[in-house]
Amino acid sequence: MKTNIQKKNKAPNKIWQLQEAKAMFSEVIKAAALQPQIITVYGKKTAVILSYGEYKKLSCPKLSLFDFFQNSPLRDIELEFPARLPEKTRVVDL
């Protein structure tokens, strides 16, 4: 039986056909701890299985929006806004 995990020093396969991933699910999960695993359906890349640590890095913001703007290198730049034009009005005889 062909194994998807290569020798210890080599990286595991990164692309699995769906039926193969289902049959060897525990191996796919173990490999995902090392690097993301891609699942294909009819040859089309459809899903990715990744470690929980990688998921947390991707899904959790590092800074709040307030902190982001506070730490911006552009925070001291003064913006110039054009003067507002007077509203155009028209006189209507009633």
Image (cartoon, rainbow, N blue to C red):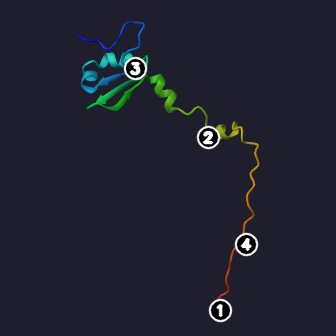
N-terminal label among 1 and 3: 3
Image position, residue 94 (x, y; %): 63, 93
Q: Relative to 47, is 91 on the left or the right?
A: right
N-terminal label among 3 and 2: 3
Q: Residues within 10 Å of mark 2 (few under 14, many from 20)?
A: few
* Disc 1: which residue: 93
Q: Residues within 10 Å of mark 3 (few under 14, many from 20)?
A: many
* Disc 4: which residue: 86
Q: Residues within 10 Å of mark 4 (few under 14, many from 20)?
A: few
Q: CA distance from mark 4 to mark 2?
A: 35 Å
* Disc 3: which residue: 32
* Residue at the limit of the structure toward the top, as seen here: 8
Q: CA distance from mark 1 to mark 3?
A: 77 Å
- Vertical relation: 48 (above or below) 32: below
Residue type at the position of mark 1: Asp
Q: Secondary structure at mark 4?
A: loop
- Of the numbered discs in the image, which one, if any, rests on residue 65? 2
Circle 4 or circle 2, nearest the eye: 4
Image position, residue 70 (x, y; %): 70, 39
N-terminal label among 4 and 3: 3
The answer to whether the residues at label 1 and label 4 have Cβ atoms under 8 Å apart is: no
Q: Secondary structure at mark 3?
A: helix
